[in-house]
Structures are given as structure tokens and as C-alpha cells.
Amino acid sequence: MKRLLSLLLLCLAVPVSAQTGLPPAPYADRQLDDPQQETAARDLMEELRCLKCQSQSIADSNAPMAGDMRSQVRERIAAGETPEEVRNWLIERYGNWVSYNPPIDSAVTWPLWIAPIILLFAALWLARGRFRKPKDRE
């Protein structure tokens, strides 16, 4: 019985140990006082990918890392940086993957931009052959 109780307590203690002991970032969930700066920060946060969730923007994610990134965005915009400067800083820090709109000039990302065009032309070429009327035979 003691072993079962110890095992149960151990299983319950694992999620508690996974919680971070650090305080939340100051601007993770607090808006900036200047409405224009907050709008610029919010627009930028919608364009940045949460590195932990991967399918959510940092504006929508509840992950602690997304909160840290939201705070960094707000702090830098409040300090006078433009959204483009903040985006470039985050891309430099985390790579192009952090942005939902990666630049075309990268050797890694240009195939992502050109592939849909190539697939569209391939689909049109296949459809042309598929839907062509058969010629009358004599």
C-alpha cells in the first residue's frame, strides 16, 4: 500500500516539477500604454510563429516562450524600434522559420515560393491532356 501511495505521489509531482519558477515576462499579457505602439506590436505578433506551438502565432499562444516573445516585441517597440527592425532581430535570433512570411532572398526559402507556381503549371499541363477532345478518325 505504501508503494502504491508513493507511486501515485510521484506521478502527481512530475507535472508540478515541469512548471517554471520564473516570473512571467512583464509585457507578456500587458498592453502598451500608447495605442499606436500596441497596434504595431499586435500586428507584428500576428506574423510571428510560436516556436513551441508551431501552428499558432505568438499573439494566440499561451506557451511561456510565446509570452516571452510578446514581451520582447512590446519592449522593443516601446523603446522606439520599428516593427521591421524587431522582426529582423527575431529572425536573426531564431531564424526565418519564426516568421509566417519568410523573405524570398534566402536560398532555403525560395523553393517554398516557387514550388506552388511550378505545381500550378504542371497541373494545367496535365489537365490540358486530360480534357482535350479526341480527334475524329477517318
Image: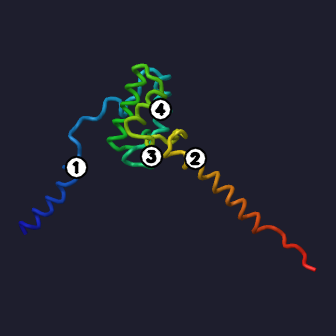
Residue 27 to residue 121: above or below = above
Give the residue at mark 4. Answer: 42
Residue type pointed to by label 3: Gln
**Residue closer to the observer: 85 or 108:** 108
Marks 2 and 3, how far apart in space? 21 Å
Q: Is residue 27 left or right of residue 138?
A: left
Residue 18 is tagged as 1
Mark positioned earlier in the residue sequence (2 or 3)? 3
Residue 125 to residue 37: above or below = below
Query: Residue shown at 49%/38% (left/top)?
Result: 47
Marks 2 and 1, how far apart in space? 39 Å
Question: What element does badge 1 sit on?
Answer: helix
Question: What element does badge 2 sit on?
Answer: helix
Corner quadrant of residue 49: top left
Mark positioned earlier in the residue sequence (2 or 1)? 1
Q: Residue furthest right?
A: 138
Give the residue at mark 3. Answer: 56
